Image (cartoon, rainbow, N blue to C red):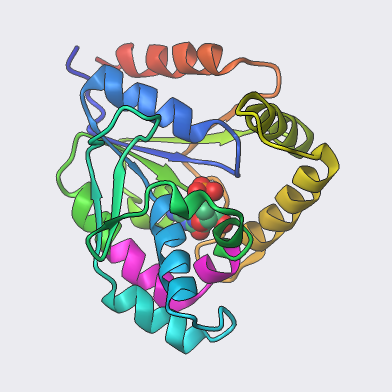
C-alpha cells in the first residue's frame, strides 16, 4: 500500500486512544511513530531530577532548551513504542511516574518549552512518512499535514479506559481520582494561551465513545486506503 498521506497528525485529549491508534497505523503503513507527549514528559522529568521548582518558568524553559533528549526506535519488546533517552539514560518508563504525570500539564503550558519542543518535532516531521501524535500537531506543529485526525471521547469514557488499563496491570486505582485528574488536565491543556488542545479546522473529528479501538483503527485505515 502506498498511501498519498505522508504526514499524519493525530491529536486528542488524554486517554482518547490516540497513542495506541497512532502506533498501529504507523506499524501498518511502515511509517515513523512519534508520540510528542513523551517530550513534554522528559522536560518535566529533567526539571524534577535537577531539583528545580516547576513553577519557575525561566529555569524549566532553560532545561527544555538545553536538554539532551533522543527519541529512538524501540530497543526492547516490553510494551514501549520508543526509547526515550535523556542525557544518555533510558527514561522510557520513568516519564510515566505519578510525579511527572501531575506536573507535565503545567510544564507543557510554558511558551519557551513549547517553542523548543515544536522545533524538535518539526525537524523529525521533515523526514516524512510519519504519524505524529499530540495535542497541537494539526494546529501548530505540522499545519500542512496531509491528514489530520482529532480523536475525541467523553471524560467519563476516557477515565474508565485509564482505570481499566491500570487495574489490568495490577495497579491500585480509584476511578473518581482518575476522572478528577483527567478533568484538571483537560482544563489546563485546552485553556492554555499557547497551542491549546483543539481540533484543526480541517481535521476529521472521530468520537470513539461508542467504538472500540479496533473499530477506530479500521475506520481510519479505510479513510487512508481509499485515498491510495
Ligand atoms: O499525551 P500525554 O499524556 O503523554 O501528554 C503529556 C502532557 O503533554 C499533557 O499534559 C499534554 C502535553 N502535550 C502537549 O501539550 N502537546 C503535545 N503535542 C503533546 C502533549
Q: Which of 20 and 80 is in front in this view?
A: 80
Quarter of the image with the N terminus is top left
Q: Which residue is drawn at 81% across and 37% down?
A: 175
Q: Residue at x 60, y 34 (%)?
A: 16
Q: Which of 195 and 62 is in front in this view?
A: 62
Report x, y in % for residue 189.
Answer: 61, 59
Q: Which residue is drawn at 67% across and 56% down?
A: 185
Quarter of the image with the C terminus is top left
Kindly indicate the quadrant of the structure image that contains residue 161.
Answer: top right
The stretch in magenta equals 105-119
Was residue 142 drawn as part of the magenta stretch in this picture? no
Q: Nearer the viewer, residue 220 or 186?
A: 186
Magenta region, mostly helix, strand or loop? helix
Q: Which residue is drawn at 81% across and 47% down?
A: 177
Residue 47 vs 120, above or below: the answer is below
Report x, y in % for residue 213.
Answer: 55, 18
Was residue 112 drawn as part of the magenta stretch in this picture? yes
On the question of residue 200 being in view, the answer is: no
Residue 176 vs 228, above or below: the answer is below
Image position of 108 (left or right of 175) = left
Residue 194 vs 19, above or below: the answer is below
Q: Nearer the viewer, residue 138 or 168?
A: 168
Amino acid at each position: 500500500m502506498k498511501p498519498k498521506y505522508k504526514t499524519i497528525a493525530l491529536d486528542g485529549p488524554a486517554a482518547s486512544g490516540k497513542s495506541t491508534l497512532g502506533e498501529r497505523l504507523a506499524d501498518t503503513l511502515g511509517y515513523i511513530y512519534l508520540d510528542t507527549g513523551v517530550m513534554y514528559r522528559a522536560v518535566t522529568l529533567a526539571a524534577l531530577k535537577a531539583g528545580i521548582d516547576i513553577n519557575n518558568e525561566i529555569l524549566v524553559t532553560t532545561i527544555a532548551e538545553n536538554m539532551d533528549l533522543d527519541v529512538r526506535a524501540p530497543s526492547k519488546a516490553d510494551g514501549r513504542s520508543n526509547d526515550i533517552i535523556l542525557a544518555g539514560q533510558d527514561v522510557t518508563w520513568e516519564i510515566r511516574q505519578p510525579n511527572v504525570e501531575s506536573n507535565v500539564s503545567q510544564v507543557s503550558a510554558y511558551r519557551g518549552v513549547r517553542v523548543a519542543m515544536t522545533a524538535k518535532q518539526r525537524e523529525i516531521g521533515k523526514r516524512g512518512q510519519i504519524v505524529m501524535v499530540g495535542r497541537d500537531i494539526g494546529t501548530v506543529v505540522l499545519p500542512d499535514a496531509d491528514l489530520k485526525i482529532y480523536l475525541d471521547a467523553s471524560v467519563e469514557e476516557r477515565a474508565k479506559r485509564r482505570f481499566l488499563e491500570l487495574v489490568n496491570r495490577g495497579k491500585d486505582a480509584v476511578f473518581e481520582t482518575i476522572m478528577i485528574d483527567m478533568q484538571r488536565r483537560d482544563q489546563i491543556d485546552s485553556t492554555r494561551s499557547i497551542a491549546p488542545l483543539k481540533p484543526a479546522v480541517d481535521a476529521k473529528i472521530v468520537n470513539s465513545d461508542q467504538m472500540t479501538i479496533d473499530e477506530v483503527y479500521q475506520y481510519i485505515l479505510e479513510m487512508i486506503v481509499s485515498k491510495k
